[in-house]
Image (cartoon, rainbow, N blue to C red):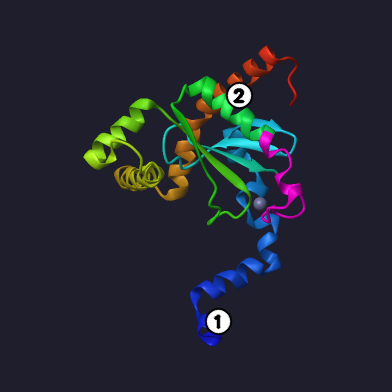
Amino acid sequence: MRAGFATDARAQHYRTCDDSSMTDPKECPFCRYDADMRDRTFYERLNWFAILADPPNMSGHVVLAVKGAEVCPRALTADVLRGLDVALADVMRILQVHHHPKHILLSSLRVQDPHFHVHLFPVSEDAEQRWRDSKGSEYEAGHFHEFLGDQERAAFRDQALERLTNGWSTAEQRLERTSRLTPHAAALRHCWRQINRQNGPAIS
Ligand SMILES: [Zn+2]
């Protein structure tokens, strides 16, 4: 069994994850924090920042990430997670004020980008109902774990169609999308400033 496992693709994956090069901040988009990331950032406080996701799986999809330092923060130590409660509450408040959603869904799989981050999805009552109607009578209640998977699948399909229609590469599509997301990021930044104004002096 042991020899079989060693040749298995999963074993290769675990070896790669253990490799110290995997913690190199240069290899990680969150640690690089380039101009594209900066344009999509709407919240910063202590060691946390929140950006509009690109590509978004649905309208309003955001990502809250811990800032990198000399090592990409991938292990869930108490040090990495410090301040997450406050940052999560802040970003959920921004999404509540800006979108008035029925729910805010959270997800943190970190498969492609192991740098610690949390996805947040504001979901309106209409969006939930449209999804339930599209799924049929068994979905009048419950099954909500499937919602995000269906949104992701539909987004991938739409993005592939958009690339095909416009003759764009993935990189060209990303540039185009970021320019569309920039005003939305500015609106969320404004929302965060307003919240701070109501609650007292801005903290960051
Ligand atoms: Zn990183």
Q: Farthest residue toward the left?
A: 137
Q: Position of residue 203 (x, y in %)?
A: 75, 24
User: Sequence-wise, which precedes: disc 1 or disc 2?
Assistant: 1
- Span shown in magenta: 68-85
User: What quarter of the picture does the C terminus occupy?
Assistant: top right
Along the viewing direction, whichever of 12 and 75 lies nearer the viewer: 75
The stretch drawn in magenta includes residue 69: yes
Q: Secondary structure at mark 2?
A: helix
User: Does 173 sit left or right of 114 as displayed?
Assistant: left
Cβ of mark 1 under 8 Å from ligand 1: the answer is: no
Which residue was labeled with disc 1?
6
Residue type indicated by callout 1: Ala
The answer to the question of whether label 1 and label 2 lie on touching residues, with beta carbons closer than 8 A, is no
Residue at the spot x=57%, y=25% of the render?
Answer: 94
Residue at the spot x=74%, y=42% of the render?
Answer: 82
User: Does 61 sit left or right of 155 as displayed?
Assistant: right
Which residue was labeled with disc 2?
189
Q: Main secondary structure of the magenta part?
A: loop
